[in-house]
Image (cartoon, rainbow, N blue to C red):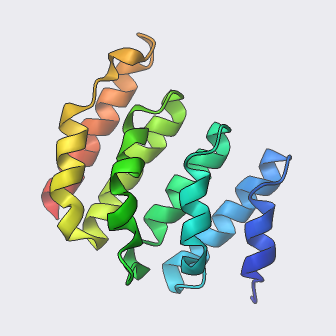
Amino acid sequence: MLINVAETFELLFDKNNNTAYKALQTLQKVCEESDKVYCYMDKLTDMIGNDNSYIRTIGLTLIAYNAKWDKDNKIDEIIDKYLKHIKDIKPITARQCIKLLPIIAKNKPELKEDIVSALQKADISIYADSMQPLVYKDIQYSLAEIEKL
């Protein structure tokens, strides 16, 4: 199946979240097999600063999925910006970020210490009581996964 990466990338910004999600899933598959999405790293970096939490989450996801192709060390340059999303204002975005960190740690071992440190220092008291245990569990899970690497 031939995928037009440029067209699919544009669909990430579709007003219909289902369309955007399908585009994300398609691009995640592309990232698993090739570096065809890597040329969008600067745009993905911009996305993690977006006001829309859904756009931030998509950016975080595709940056992590591009870690194995990061020959220019673009993730190294933005890791602090990325790790801030462990405490994203939206707990769902924070949880996604936390769950993606083992992928980055696996493919960018030089960032493992920074990632572990950020996870250990994360103050999850900013979240509602109902969300804190979930975020805490995600952090523990990611730390355990990174420990195995």
Tell me where residue 3 appears, x and y as whole percent: 75, 83
Q: Which residue shows up at 17% across the image and 44% down it?
A: 117
Q: Which residue shows up at 78% across the image and 83% down it?
A: 4
Locate the C terminus by quadrant: bottom left
- Furthest residue in direction front, as rendered: 77
- Furthest residue in direction right, as rendered: 15
Tell me where residue 130 appears, x and y as whole percent: 44, 13
Asked where in the image residue 37 lies, by quadrant, the reply is bottom right
Asked where in the image residue 124 lies, by quadrant, the reply is top left
Q: Which residue shows up at 65% across the image and 37% down it?
A: 51
Q: Please say if 33 is above or below 113.
A: below
Please state which of residues 67 and 76 is positioned toward the viewer in this rendering.
76
Left or right of 49 on screen, residue 116: left
Does residue 104 show up?
yes
Q: Please say if 85 is above or below 109.
A: above
Tell me where residue 95 appears, x and y as whole percent: 44, 37
Left or right of 82 on screen, residue 120: left
Asked where in the image residue 41 lies, by quadrant, the reply is bottom right
Q: Please say if 70 is above or below 122.
A: below
Left or right of 50 on screen, residue 117: left
Tell me where residue 99 appears, x and y as whole percent: 39, 48
Left or right of 111 on screen, residue 38: right
Total numbered circles? 0
Does residue 99 show up?
no
Locate the N terminus by quadrant: bottom right
Q: Please say if 141 is above or below 43.
A: above
Q: Which residue shows up at 24% across the image and 51% down it?
A: 115
